Amino acid sequence: MPELPEAETVARDLAAALPGRRFESVQVNRPRSALSDPAALEDALQGRLVESVNRRGKAVVFALSGEGRLAFHMKMSGRLHLPEADEAPIKHTHLVFGFSGRESGGVIEPPRGLWFIDPRTFGWCFAGTPAELDALTYFRNLGADPLDLSPAAFAAQYANRRGRIKALLLNQSIIAGVGNIYADESLFRARIRPDAQAQDIPPAKLARLGKAVREVLLESIACCGSTISDYRNAKGDVGAFQNRFAVYGRAGRPCPRCGKPLESTRIAGRSTVFCASCAGQPEKP
DNA sequence: GTGGCCCTGTGA
DNA sequence: TCACAGGGCCAC
């Protein structure tokens, strides 16, 4: 489900609700949703204070007192949900965390829970030290954050690389956070065919792509992400950026720029929608 | 680099 | 019944 904007939205929700609270309990309904076994998970969390919650790539990472880390990857259908006190159970809730109350602005807030919900079960949770976290395959291979890169620095990451530009955008070891939706939307804005070979794209055009990626991600964050079906923020609300899609999920419908029908193809195993007319032909046929 | 594969749910 | 879905890993 989430790409960078959705993970960022959830991390911000959690960062408003959880710092200053202590872990009190962990209930593991589906052991395979955690990379560590239940006892180790509880050991790594018990009594620790939540210091901050941030995003790394598409993952949500908690910093805990005593140099602890807790990380989640939602993959296709995962959710992190802050339930109301009397909220009815939600199907596919694999992990249930309990946090202490906290004092905030002179007010005592009651304890809160956090649910990890994941119908397709591809997502994961991990607790451990910073070094153990960085050693995970996902974090070990994580590239730069696109929001931190200037268009020129972005272009430098892709210049002279072999392969189709969309497949490279999806490669998290180059730039971390762009997925199938935002790859297509960014390429459309930059007027680049998703099947163009990266090495054939002039630096100025790659820089335009860097600018487009940044704009699309920031606009989506401002909309609290995109909801196709599963995605919700931590409070359970849908995002709004799906209403602004120019190409994703719109194959065969008119291009919002030129009116010609949008085409679809498959790249890196993912459905890909683009406007052949606006993007022009590949730099080299 | 590309293609299965890990799963459940949904819609054609 | 089948194809497909915001991802990423590992074997060809």
Image (cartoon, coloured by chain):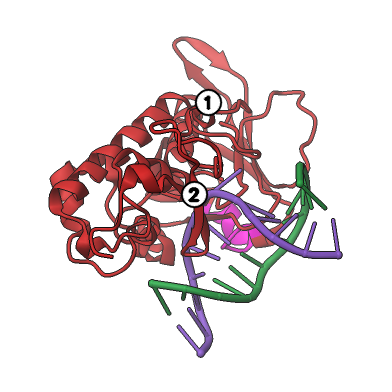
Chain colours: A red, B green, C purple
Q: Disc 1 sits on a residue from what chain?
A: A
Tell me the residue that label 2 is attached to.
A263
Above or below, A137 against A243 in this view is: below
Lower sequence index among marks 2 and 1: 1
Are the residues flagged by discs 2 and 1 from a single subunit? yes
Question: Does residue A73 appear to the left or right of A122 in the view shown?
Answer: left
Start-end of magenta stretch: A33-44
Q: Quadrant of the N terminus of chain A?
A: top right
Extreme residue toward the top, this view: A106
Above or below, A28 against A278 in this view is: below
Taking depth in this image into account, of A207 and A69 the one nearest to the observer is: A207
By secondary structure, the bulk of the magenta-drawn segment is best described as helix
Taking depth in this image into account, of A270 and A188 the one nearest to the observer is: A188
- Callout 2 amino acid: Glu
Residue A261 spot, x, y in % from top left: 50, 41
Residue A93 spot, x, y in % from top left: 72, 45
Which residue sits at x=28%, y=65%? A285
- Callout 1 amino acid: Ala
Which residue sits at x=57%, y=62%? A35
Circle on res. A134: none
Tell me the residue that label 1 is attached to.
A240
A23 drawn magenta? no
